[in-house]
Image: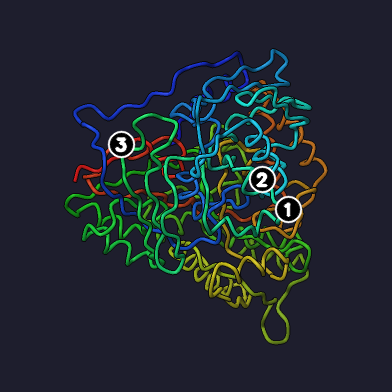
């Protein structure tokens, strides 16, 4: 599970690191060249991770595009497209030297100009771009194989943002043509990447097929000839395909606890919860804080007392996950349990609603609202929404469940703030500046999904976010995040649900399945199949 050692924080912006990039097969196993790995996709809108966050784009995107570094088991950066780097003593500049003779899938050389273009593209277009790279004041390219980032202030999470999921290296000669990058046709057609696999077939309605790029800059890699992603939207269908051996590898598969117990008994199937540490997937009830009744904290506290997240953890997830207690996943090294708690108490919930002015009306009702249920992660959001509807009915609150027919419909409603409340979930990502700040920063109240869509603004919390973003001392940074967790739980920005049951299922013929903190969102350069 998540490595809780502080090593990954203390050494990130320190002296120069110049280790060589080497990986090996497990003891007793001999990697085999060739073969096809079959996994799945639940649907995607783009193959370009520079403009889209999340696993749907990130899983294939991290195979198609390289990053400057990889993140190892101890959260320390490892060489990838950058073979060495040096950090200035004041932490305000980092110089990278690129590997020799790296090329894009069309044969064009990868240069420092491509890296500069890619970082600027991510900074200006990715949902977390400003959080990751807003402090990059200047980018120098003194040579085709050297690039220097100049920072306006120290950025403790910088190196963990430079791996392929969050900062893919794009071909400038393809994308710098004046077209809008978010809707650029080359995001889906004739995709030219920089990673170990290239796109052979892209039919979002049926399947995505990637094939080995023979010109990849790591000699002898990847082992696999092909990765196939058939479109499989239904989680139960995935379970059946895993049992039958029709899927070799499935991460973010939406496995329910009952399905997990079933797969644990299946022959030739292996399961692990490793490979999700850098993500920290949390669930929560999001409320539109701009409108009544959720603009009243007493109402939010009433709901917090009415919703028993411990019960949900046992019933929905079979006791395999922990109840959420705040914005940080319990596996995060900055996690603090010292936060306000709201124990199940229906009498207190009713009293709080009365105090807030929501007593029973002539029809015996307090108020009503629409709860949007996303189409994604239905095994978590659906049962939780139904429980909330039934539980709040006991308080004479009418909850209408509005189930989104597809991802785009839900995104449009939430990002345009056209909602009362919604079931939601997000990744912490490897540093809080990437995945956590976005939900609480006053300046991030935007019409963008997984930003501060609920409309929360607290100047004291903003000050905490700004201080933690540049603090390089581990203990001081931890104390700032502990205070942040207290404050947002006092304000009840969200009502946190049980954490996600994240599990990867694979066939026993799959070797070197990725188990680093990014798991399936890391490149499959070392993965092989035995037959």
- Would you say the residues marked 3 and 2 are in contact, meaning their CB atoms lie under 8 Å apart? no
Q: Nearer the viewer, residue 96 or 102?
A: 102
Q: Residue at the spot x=25%, y=43% of the render? A: 529
Which mark, residue 178? Answer: 1
Q: Is residue 27 left or right of residue 486?
A: left
The local secondary structure at tag 3 comes to: loop
Q: Nearer the viewer, residue 493 or 158?
A: 158
Q: Is residue 208 visible?
A: yes
Residue farthest to the front? 107
Question: Where in the figure is residue 481, as x and y percent of width and height?
Answer: 66, 34
Asked whether 476 or 98 is in front, the reply is: 98
| In this view, 302 is above or below 389 | above
What distance separates the C-alpha of mark 1 from that of mark 3?
41 Å
Q: Nearer the viewer, mark 1 or mark 3?
A: 1
Residue drawn 53% across the image and 59% down it: 189
Q: Earlier in the sequence, mark 3 or mark 2?
A: 2
Which residue was labeled with disc 3? 512
Q: Which badge, 1 or 2, comes first in the chain's sequence?
A: 2
Horizontal side, residue 154 vs residue 171: left or right? right
In this rendering, position of residue 143 left or right of residue 466: left
- Decide: marks 1, 3 in contact (CB < 8 A)? no
Q: Residue at x 78, y 31 (%)?
A: 137
Q: Secondary structure at mark 2?
A: loop
Q: Nearer the viewer, residue 328 or 201?
A: 201
Label disc, if present, on residue 128 of the rendered structure = 2
């Amino acid at each position: 599970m998540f490595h809780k050692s502080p090593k990954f924080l203390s050494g990130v912006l320190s002296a120069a690191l110049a280790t060589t990039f080497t990986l090996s097969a497990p003891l007793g196993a001999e990697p085999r060249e060739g073969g096809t790995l079959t996994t799945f996709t639940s649907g995607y809108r783009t193959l370009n991770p520079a403009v889209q966050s999340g696993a749907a784009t990130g899983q294939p995107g991290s195979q198609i595009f390289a990053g400057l570094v990889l993140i190892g088991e101890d959260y320390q950066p490892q060489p990838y497209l950058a073979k060495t780097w040096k950090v200035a003593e004041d932490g305000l500049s980092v110089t990278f030297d690129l590997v020799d003779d790296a090329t894009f899938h069309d044969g064009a050389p990868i240069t420092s100009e491509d890296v500069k273009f890619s970082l600027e593209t991510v900074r200006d277009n990715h949902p977390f771009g400003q959080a990751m790279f807003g402090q990059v004041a200047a980018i120098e390219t003194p040579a085709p194989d050297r690039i220097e980032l100049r920072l306006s202030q120290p950025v403790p999470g910088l190196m963990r943002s430079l791996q392929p999921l969050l900062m893919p290296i794009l071909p400038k000669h393809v994308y710098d043509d004046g077209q809008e990058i978010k809707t650029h046709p080359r995001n889906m057609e004739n995709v030219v990447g920089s990673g170990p696999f290239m796109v052979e077939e892209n039919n979002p309605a049926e399947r995505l097929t990637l094939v080995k790029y023979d010109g990849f800059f790591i000699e002898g890699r990847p082992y696999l000839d092909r990765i196939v992603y058939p479109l499989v939207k239904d989680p139960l269908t995935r379970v059946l395909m895993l049992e039958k051996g029709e899927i070799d590898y499935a991460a973010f598969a939406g496995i329910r606890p009952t399905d997990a117990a079933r797969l644990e008994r299946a022959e030739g199937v292996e399961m692990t919860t490793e490979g999700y540490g850098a993500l920290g997937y949390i669930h929560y009830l999001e409320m539109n804080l701009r409108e009544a009744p959720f603009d009243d904290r007493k109402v939010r506290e009433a709901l917090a007392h009415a919703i028993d997240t411990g019960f949900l953890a046992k019933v929905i997830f079979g006791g395999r996950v922990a109840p959420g207690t705040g914005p940080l996943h319990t596996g995060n090294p900055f996690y603090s349990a010292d936060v306000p708690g709201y124990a199940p108490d229906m009498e207190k919930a009713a009293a709080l609603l009365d105090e807030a002015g929501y007593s029973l009306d002539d029809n015996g009702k307090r108020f009503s609202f629409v709860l949007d249920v996303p189409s994604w992660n239905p095994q978590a959001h659906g049962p939780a929404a139904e429980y909330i509807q039934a539980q709040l009915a006991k308080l004479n609150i009418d909850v209408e469940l509005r189930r989104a027919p597809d991802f785009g419909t839900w995104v449009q409603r939430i990002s345009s703030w056209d909602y009362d409340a919604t079931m939601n979930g997000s990744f912490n990502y490897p540093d809080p500046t990437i995945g956590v700040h976005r939900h609480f920063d006053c300046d991030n109240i935007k019409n963008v999904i997984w930003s501060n869509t609920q409309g929360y603004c607290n100047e004291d919390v903003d000050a905490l976010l700004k201080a933690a973003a540049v603090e390089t001392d581990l203990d001081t940074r931890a104390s700032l995040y502990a205070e942040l967790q207290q404050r947002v739980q006092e304000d009840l920005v969200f009502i946190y649900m049980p954490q996600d049951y994240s599990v990867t299922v694979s066939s026993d013929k799959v070797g070197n399945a990725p188990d680093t903190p990014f798991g399936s969102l890391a490149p499959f350069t070392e993965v092989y199949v035995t037959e």
